[in-house]
Image (cartoon, helix red, strand yellow):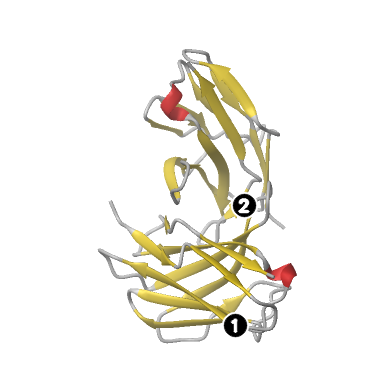
Amino acid sequence: GAVVSQHPSRVICKSGTSVKIECRSLDFQATTMFWYRQFPKKSLMLMATSNEGSKATYEQGVEKDKFLINHASLTLSTLTVTSAHPEDSSFYICSAEPGGDEQFFGPGTRLTVL
Amino acid sequence: GDSVTQMEGPVTLSEEAFLTINCTYTATGYPSLFWYVQYPGEGLQLLLKATKADDKGSNKGFEATYRKETTSFHLEKGSVQVSDSAVYFCALSGRGAQKLVFGQGTRLTINP
């Protein structure tokens, strides 16, 4: 099946620093990628939809200047959490869609901001 | 807006027990419905789906039927195994929309 990877799987950073998370589709091209955030014991919440070569579409309430998304190629999307604060600590999950209605999910990245 | 509600977890069962995880939804129009499973340390995987009323999705012994009249998509399995231990997410996507709306997830633990 289609494989999506995320890097890093876990990151700890100091408050005020920026963190970049990569999402790669390993064996298919993804015109669309999605970024989700998952709080403990809560559902996945869609943050933004990323289309290759165009600006990401952010969900209501998500700060686009804080969560920078770049989808520079058909196999790579990045999420940069700028000036991270402890409240940004969370589990970030990406998914990729090769076309059709099925999304393939990465294993997630655990971000801890001290 | 669209929403999905799952039964609260965690759910703990013995091997070979019957499983039901309830899922109800609120949506405009006729959404597609999904069950995803997340095994420890792995990403979400599509378990099954149904795209129209009365459709039954099935995979690995799991089944769920799209019930429009009760806006439900309950997940069932007749005899669970230890390897079924995971977190299960019910989700929907609106007609023509790419976005998935997830329920809160139900953690299932099967004891031998």
The amino acid type found where label 1 is placed reads Ser
Above/below status of B62 relative to B36: above
Camera-near label (1 vs 2) is 1
Chain letter for mark 1: A
Q: Nearer the viewer, residue A40 or A99?
A: A40
Residue at left offset 45%, top offset 56%: A107
Place residue B93 in its image quadrant.
Answer: bottom right
Judge from the rendering whether residue B46 lies leftward or rightward of residue B99; answer left or right. left
Above/below status of B3 relative to B60: below
Q: Nearer the viewer, residue A84 or A33?
A: A84
Secondary structure, mark 2, is loop
Residue at left offset 65%, top offset 77%: A14
Q: Which residue is mark 1?
A: A18
Q: Which residue is mark 2?
A: B29
Q: Are discs 1 and 2 less than 8 Å apart at CB? A: no
Judge from the rendering whether residue B69 lies leftward or rightward of residue B37; answer left or right. right
Above/below status of A6 relative to B20: below
The amino acid type found where label 2 is placed reads Gly
Callout 1 crowding tier (Cα within 10 Å): few <14, some 14–19, many ≥20: some
Number of numbered discs overlaid on the protein picture: 2
Chain letter for mark 2: B
Are discs 1 and 2 both within one chain?
A: no
